[in-house]
Amino acid sequence: MAGLGLHLYAAEAFGEAAGAWRSRDRAASAARAAALALALRGRCQEAATPALAGAAAAVPLSARERDIALMAARGRTSREIAEAYVLSVRTVENHLGRIYRKLGVTGRADLADVLLG
């Protein structure tokens, strides 16, 4: 649906999928679907529908993790992220590892797909 430009329908479908995954205790799959729902919702002027209501709650990232994840998804290096937040590169890498596990992704390319659509 997203490929056809039907971003809201795709966002709602991912939101529903997130709920289905959550009900089956598949947290990583739920988080990934919810993150995709929210990324697509961003292309729809932050629309709010019943199907999207639970998507935000399913993305278990803290505000700091979300900021770091977005910077990494946009191509910033770990060193650049570390400098921006006055952290060590190792701390940024630890954050990214937790983010990958929470979202069920394996690296920055997947992270960009999930967060930036």
Image (cartoon, rainbow, N blue to C red):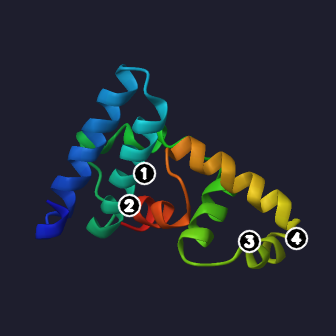
Tell me if label 1 and label 2 are in contact, CB under 8 Å: yes
Identified at 14% across, 64% down, the residue is 6
Q: Residue furthest top?
A: 24
Q: CA distance from mark 2 to mark 4?
A: 27 Å
Image quadrant containing the C terminus: bottom left
- Mark 1 or 3, which is nearer the eye? 3
- The first of marks 3 and 2 along the sequence is 2
Relative to 53, 7 lies left or right: left
Mark number displayed over residue 35 = 1
Residue shown at the point (81%, 69%) measured from the top left? 85
Q: Which mark is residue 86?
A: 4
Q: Is residue 14 left or right of residue 90?
A: left
Under mark 2, the amino acid is Ala
Alpha carbons under labels 3 and 2: distance apart: 22 Å
The residue located at (40%, 64%) in the rendering is 113
Instruction: Give the side of residue 16 with respect to residue 105, left or right.
Output: left
Q: Are marks 1 and 3 in contact (CB under 8 Å)?
A: no
Q: Identify residue type, mark 4.
A: Val
Q: Position of residue 79 (x, y in %)?
A: 79, 76
Label 2 vs 4, first from the N-terminus: 2
